[in-house]
Structures are given as structure tokens and as C-alpha cells.
Amino acid sequence: MTSRFFLVYLLSSTLISPTTGADILSPDQSLTDDGQTLISTGGTFELGFFGSDKRYVGIWYSKVSVRTVVWVANRRQPITGTSGSLSIKTNGTLVITDENATVVWYSSSRALANPVAQLLDNGNFVVRESGSNSNDPNSFAWQSFDFPTDTLLPGMKLGWNLTSGLNRNLTAWTSDSDPAPSEYTMAVDVRGYPEIFLCSRSTRTWRTGPWNGLGFSGIPEMKTYDKLSFDFVVNRDEVFYSFYVHDASFITRLIVNQSGITQRLVWIEQSKIWNAFWFAPKDQCDKVSQCGPNGVCDPNESPICDCLNGFRPKNPSNWALRDASDGCRRKTELDCRNGTDGFVMVSGVKLPDTSSSVANMSLSLSLEQCKTMCLTNCSCTAYAAANISASGTGSGCIMWTTELTDLRVYTNGGQDLYLRLAAADLGSESNPSHQRHIVVIVVVLAVMITLLASTAFCIRRRKKRRSTGMSANISFSERYINEGREGKDIDLPLFDLGTIIDATNNFSVDSKLGEGGFGPVYKGNLGEEQEIAVKRLSKTSVQGLDEFKNEVMLIAKLQHRNLVRLLGCCIQDEERMLIYEYMPNRSLDAILFGYGYMSPEYAMDGIFSVKSDVFSFGVLVLEIVSGKRNRGVYHSAPQLNLLGYAWSLWKEGRASELVDESMGYSFPMAEALRCLKVGLLCVQDRPEHRPTMSSAVLMLGSDGALLPQPRQPGFVSTKGPLESDSSASKQDSVSVNDISITMVEGR
């Protein structure tokens, strides 16, 4: 602090307190830490001192029953004790002093002749000339909206004033009780075509994608909000994002929380809670450049990373271990000189990072003109429309001249990207040499097909001869279960090991369909027409002979037209295998969410009961409500599966954050929470604690039913490094427009 400023403070006159409930502070007044506050004209916001051991000057909602601070003046310099004071000097400077009259914080603004400070009804604390228009931002010499903490309110700007160099960004609190700045920030990057980034210190963790006239390409659900409108301004003076509410009773704020997650929170007056309306990051693919340069991320696939068309992994060995950080490289280099390059459309994507892109926002520029501009620029690797708010294919042009990073796909929403590829990767026949190559390839293929047909004929004749190797006269129950138990009525054929080896081509890699919790699954052929799926128990599996017997008995007894049929089993030497009918419409786990439906008592001890079905039902309920796989990985808790993640949120009172975000704000939260609670009751670890199916149905259908508190679910322990997504394949809003119901296969 300069000696001149300190002298101004010492020469100031004796101050009096403002009128209780007033919204204006004048130079002859001070706001002391004895319960005095300023209250905006409409009673929406309140300004005063808060905190316990450390005291701060802040602004909070006056009409919200839960104290919610949206701005803090002295977040870096708290006051110890309750003798602090806020005042405005005669030159318009705001000052906070402690009990020793030491200045701990002050504002900087241009000098005013007759200044006043006023708390406006939008939450903005402003300094202006007395008598000026409080609704005119140009009359403000200083305003709190220019210095946000962790919260963006309606009408606030997140971004840059390019004239003054002012950068308005959000910085999370260190903890719930400590508003000091943490490592997590959200800010606008003005390089290339501007985007908003979420960062942990200098590391970028999430981005919005570029603005396309309707919303950010990385937030497809923005267009579903009917209570909000959004604005992203890019001009020579400013670059900023802002939002507005259409109904004053709709209380919402955008924050960055202490976990590094950005949330849109909505106040639910009936429940007296802040409900997470939307949040990011949501999943693995929201992480910046999860799949490296020229890679594309799809959270509904396994593995989640793939290369763009015309590209292949740069480091295949790491890629096979699901480390895609090196990304992908072109199969064929571009040929700009000869003009043979073309484009392929990648639809429904979050557009790549635009930090190094070139953008032309002219509405008169068509998409076809954008294509021409890209083709004539040998450095251009892809292009997209800059604005899709108008009808047709869009207008304006964004061109990328470097590798494409942080690209992901969406089930619903996203934008079209036009990827530049060499002619060879487009299947082009534009030159004679390429046509000659095609002739050679056709001839080679014809020869290969003839050879393969001959080989296949021989192999099938051999398999037909070997198909008699099944021990048809000996059943599984006769050899292994005939111990006076109920299994002796089961007539399940035993297959010879040699037959299975022939059927699966000696368990070749090409025959492998996938791998479950107890071992790999192979496709095979018996005889002329019979296609089978062979589940081979891994030698390292925790499932022993007793568990294997239980699974065989269970599946054999549960034959149903909607269940995969068990054809037999093989127990020979150290091999234990189950032989199922093959399902041609993909692996079941690729259609439904995964293998994680088996109850703990069955998976670990081979014990099956009606409560096992209840457990599976509970997992399904949680998956439907959350829109997430049970065997997925969650940004805020990567060591947990869905059950563990749901339990963690439930214990912390944040269960609403689990609801599928694409449903937006179009559902009763109470019903969603009831479904989640019933799901948690069904997946409790001990069978005796779970409800019966009839009780679960009653719980779901009766709003007045009093539900018990759930206990810890089964399978919530942390996962090892290879379990993050073994299936073939914080906090806000999603709509699931496509629902598929299929069958579950035990692990």
C-alpha cells in the first residue's frame, strides 16, 4: 500500500453505520462486523461479513435458506476476530480494515467526485457517482462482476476485455470453509478460435469446444435448456461467455468446485437444496486429448479410443495396452500438389481443439467455400462450419492446420467435421496407377478366395468327422453331480477337449470374442452348421470346481427362450469350459452395459437365490437412471465402479449428481432419487438386507412408501489397473433417447 493511500485513509472522517437493510454505502458510513449488512433493493442478495475464525466480506443469496456465498472480496486476506470494517473513501476506493485499522484489502478504480457503493439486485456490488444511473454499466467506476471468485451469476461475463486487458475467470475455493483460491480455474482462451477451458494449475482438464451459434460443440445438451439463454461474444473489444434466466424465480449459478468440476446448480425451494443441473467433465472422453492427436474417443465403446479414418496408431504396442496418448498417424500422406486429396465427414463430434485453428465468422461464407479454402491451403487438415444456427449446412469456416486433438463423439448432438484424407484412404480411382493397383488386387483376391474355399472344405470335413467325439452317453450330472442332490436330473452333454480345440482352431486369437471375469470366450463351429461360443475358465480365475459346478447347474436349470442356451460343458485335464449357442448379433455385453450384474454371494460362493435376481435388478436400475455402465470409470472417483460411485454420492448427500445429465431439467428429481434409493437397496451386500422383487416394485410405484436407508452395496472395493473397463466395450443433467433391452450373461 502506498503512503499516499494510507494518508488518505487516516485523514478520512469519522464514519457512521448505514441504515439496516439499505443497499447503498456512502463515504460517511462504514459496514462493521456486528451483523450489519447491505441488502439489494429487491431483497435478492445480501453483503456483509461471514466466516468463523477467519472473517471475510462477501455476497450471498438473501432469499435462499442455505447460506450460499457467491463473491468474496478479501479471499486472500481474511480478518482474524470480529472487529473488521468495510467503507468507501471519498475518492471511490473500497477499503476493508481489521481491528487495528490496518487495511487488508482495497479496490482500485478511477477517482470520483461524489462516490457511493451499491449492492444491485443481480448480485453486482458497484461503485458509481452519486446520482448516476445504477442500471448503466458504463457509469460504474468499479464492479464486483469484474472480479469473480468461484461463481458466475446471470449477466456476469466470463472472459476478456481486450481493450483494458481484464481477464475475468473463475477460481474454486480451497475448501467449503476456505475461499482462498485453489488450483482449479475456468477461463477463456483467446488463441485461435476462443474456447473455455477448465484447468488444474497449468494442465487443461476439460474444454467446451468452440461456439457454433447455438452452443458449445462440447456441450450438446445446451440446446435443451428452455429456462436459460446463452451468449458468446467475440469481437475486437471483448471475448466473453454469459448466460441469462427467463424467469427470476429460477435461481441458478455456474461454479467451479473444489474437486475441479464445473457445475450448473439450481435451487430447489421445495427440497431446500442446490440440485446439480449439469456438470463437466462427465466421463473419460471429457478429459482433454484422452486419445492423443488424431484419435477419437467414444465412451460407449471398449476400448474407448480409436483412430480417425485414414489413420493408424502411432505406437501400436502402447495402443494395445490402452495407452493412446501418442495418438495416431496418417496411413497415407496428403498430396496437395497434385490436388488428389478429399474429405470424409465425421459426424456428431466435439470439434477438435481450436487453439491453433483459423476462423472466419462471416455468415456469407458457405460450407462449400470453406471446403475450397481448405483444399487450397496445403496445411489445412480439416474444416467445419463456424455457425450452425441458420438453416442448411451452416456458415462461416473453421480450419485446422495442425494435428487434431481432443476429438470425441456423442450419441446425440455434436457437430460435423470434414477430415482431409489422401485419395488412397478415400478409395479414390482418380489416377491410372491406382486403377492398375485395383486390377492386381482383384486377381490376388480371386486366387486367395479359391484357396480359402478349398481349405475350408477340408477343414469342415475334418470337423464333421470329429463331431462324433462328444460323450453323448455321459452327462454332466452323472459324472459330477450325482451325489443325491437335485442336479441328477440334469442331462447336460460333456464335450471332448479335442472337439473343442478343432472347433475353435486351437483357441486362436481370431476366434476370441472377448473376455469376462472368469476367462476368455471363443467362437467355434461344430459339424456343418452349429456355431458355438466357448467360455474357457482362466487358470488364474478365482472360480474353483465347486463354483463351476454351481454355474453349470444354474444355467442348465434356467433354460428360457430369452436366455442363451447352454449346449454342454468340457472338463478334461485342467480345462473347464462351458459351451453355449453362439449369438450372432454381437456379444451380449456389448449391447447391455457389462458383466457386472452377478450378486456377490453367487460370484464368490456359488450361492444363488431369489435375492440374486434382486441384486441384478438393482444394478440395472442404477444403470438406467445414471446412463452409465457398472464397469465404467468415473472422473471424480476413478477407482470405483457404478455401485461404489453411487454409494459415495449417496453418503455425501449428492445422489442427484448421478442422474443421467441428458434428461436436462425435464423430470421430477424426487422420483429419480427414489429410483436411485431403490436401486441401492437392491444391491446391498448381504442378501437378507435386500428387498424382495415384489417389495422393490411396490417401492418404485408408491410415492408414499417409507423407504429404509440402504447399506453398503456389494462390489464397491477399488479396482485394479486392468479393470477400469473390462466390458466389451459430478453432478448434473442427460436424456436417453435410445433404449435397448437385451440379455445378461454371468461372468
Image: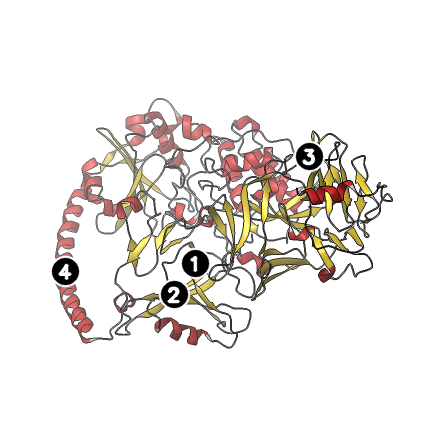
Q: Quadrant of the N terminus?
A: top right
| Whole-number angstrom distance, CA of label 1 to CA of label 3 | 49 Å
Give the amino acid at mark 3.
Leu
Instruction: Give the residue at mark 1.
Output: 352
* Few, some or many residues within 10 Å of mark 1 (<14, 14–19, 20+): many
Determine the secondary structure under disc 3. loop
* Few, some or many residues within 10 Å of mark 4 (<14, 14–19, 20+): few
| Whole-number angstrom distance, CA of label 3 to CA of label 2 | 57 Å
What residue is at 12 percent from the left and 52 percent from the top? 458
Instruction: Give the residue at mark 3.
Output: 706
Query: Which callout, 3 or 2, points at the residue further toward the start of the chain?
Result: 2
Would you say the residues marked 1 and 2 are in contact, meaning their CB atoms lie under 8 Å apart? Answer: yes
Instruction: Give the residue at mark 2.
Output: 382
Give the amino acid at mark 1.
Pro
Q: Quadrant of the C terminus?
A: top left
Viewer-nearest of discs 1 and 3: 1
| Whole-number angstrom distance, CA of label 4 to CA of label 1 | 41 Å
- Does residue 271 appear in the picture of this structure? no
Q: Which quadrant of the view contains residue 696?
A: top right
* Residue 144 coordinates in the image, percent (x, y): 69, 50
* Residue 186 coordinates in the image, percent (x, y): 55, 49
| Whole-number angstrom distance, CA of label 4 to CA of label 2 | 38 Å
Query: Which callout, 1 or 3, points at the residue further toward the start of the chain?
Result: 1
Give the amino acid at mark 4.
Met
Q: Is residue 77 left or right of residue 334?
A: right
